[in-house]
Amino acid sequence: MSASIVRRSAGAAGLVLAGVAAYLCFWPVPIEPRSWPAQAPPGFTGAYAPNTRLADLRTIDIGSEVGPEHIAIGPDGKLYAAMESGDLLRMDPDGSNQAVFASTGGRVLGFDFDRGGRMIAADPMKGLLAVTPEGRVTVLVDRVSAADPVRYANSVVVAPDGTIYFTDASTRFAPLEWGGTYEASVLDILEQSASGRVLAHDPASGNTRVVAHGLSFANGIALSADGRTLFVSETGRYRIWKIDGRARDLDVQSGSPQATILIDNLPGYPDNVMRGRDGRIWVGLFRPRNPAADGLAQKPFVRKILLRLPRSLLPLGQPYGHVFAFDESGRVTEDLQDPAGAYPETTGATETADRLYIHSLHAHTIGWVPR
């Protein structure tokens, strides 16, 4: 091979490498990552010691539907489940007599029922919705004010006094604008701008206020037994907050006694939070933590580079089924795991007298275990 050919080949390779380097370093991405103080992952120890109590789930067939992200028993005793298609299924608790109760045209991630029997649903594509017992869907809230839209309605709980509390997971990344709920959540958690918040809607006045803000992907929400305190999962920082429902526009990072961390440094990404029986509050861990991701907490520029790579290369953790229950003091009282992750992305659990239904983002069935 002549020297000129070698030089040309080397020059071409250099240009390619320079182009790749320029792409990885300078190609525009939608996030502006922030540094944050990630703790060392605790692993599966103590209350979260490995077990197989979630393995070999019994299942309810849901036909062509996918992703029972949220499951609850309605005031009529029926089982309701929100699907990826936007359909809301209604069935008997054993899975029989299934029917599409309503369809939002979006993707409901959480719901509860008010005193009038309406389903109150958080749909990140639409906002906070009300669904009548006949299946008619209307929008309750899609903005806090004219200049303050609800961009990622995620989870909801209705208080005894009728107040509707719900999470707006990210005020930075709306699923409608960024390729869906999963893609928007990845962007928000990689950025760590902590733009998530908790909102409260008063159906009587029609007013909506900010309860608290400063959360890195505000996700699941549940109420204390007395209806005054909110338990909120902060997915992006692996923890559960205890927040005073009477707070107004509170920055959770301010050190106020109205917002305290109840459970910190979880072994996975917490998702739905649901009250169960006998004082239990259930949480689903969507995936286990990846030490590589935590290692980038203080390296925002590297996180920008990662976003320019194929999504399959992101350090998101391996499939692992995991739900646990805690009491209002933060003590873990039950823990169920499936290290094989056969039932994908366990996002929560709904407890009845005889069953524990397992929520999932992408499962093709509804999983459950007998109580």
Image (spheres, rainbow, N blue to C red):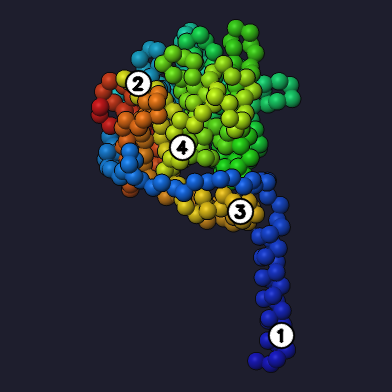
The answer to whether 301 is drawn above or below residue 191 in the figure is: below
Give the mark nearest the N terminus, 4 or 1.
1
Q: Residue at x 46, y 23 (%)?
A: 222
Give the mark nearest the N terminus, 2 or 3.
2
**Mark 4 to mark 3: distance in Å?**
22 Å
Q: Nearer the viewer, residue 339 or 361?
A: 339
Q: Nearer the viewer, residue 119 or 241?
A: 241
> Looking at the picture, which amino acid does disc 2 mark?
Gly
Point out which mark residue 7 bears: 1
Q: Mark 1: few, some, or many residues within 10 Å (few <14, many ≥20)?
A: few
Q: Mark 3: few, some, or many residues within 10 Å (few <14, many ≥20)?
A: some
Q: Are the residues tagged 2 and 1 within 8 Å (C-beta)? A: no
Give the mark nearest the N terminus, 4 or 3.
4
The nearer-to-camera label among 4 and 1 is: 4
Point out which mark residue 264 bears: 4
Q: Which residue is mark 2?
A: 279
> Looking at the picture, which amino acid does disc 1 mark?
Arg
Residue 153: x %, y % from top left = 57, 27
> Looking at the picture, which amino acid does disc 3 mark?
Lys
Q: Which residue is mark 3?
A: 299
Q: Mark 4: few, some, or many residues within 10 Å (few <14, many ≥20)?
A: some
Give the mark nearest the N terminus, 2 or 1.
1
Q: How many marks?
A: 4
Q: Mark 2: few, some, or many residues within 10 Å (few <14, many ≥20)?
A: some
**Mark 4 to mark 1: distance in Å?**
57 Å
Q: Residue at x 52, y 51 (%)?
A: 293
User: Image quarter for residue 349?
Assistant: top left
Q: Residue at x 48, y 7 (%)?
A: 116
The answer to whether 282 is drawn above or below residue 228 in the figure is: below
The answer to whether 181 is drawn above or below residue 276 in the figure is: below
Q: Residue at x 25, y 29 (%)?
A: 370
**Mark 2 to mark 3: distance in Å?**
40 Å
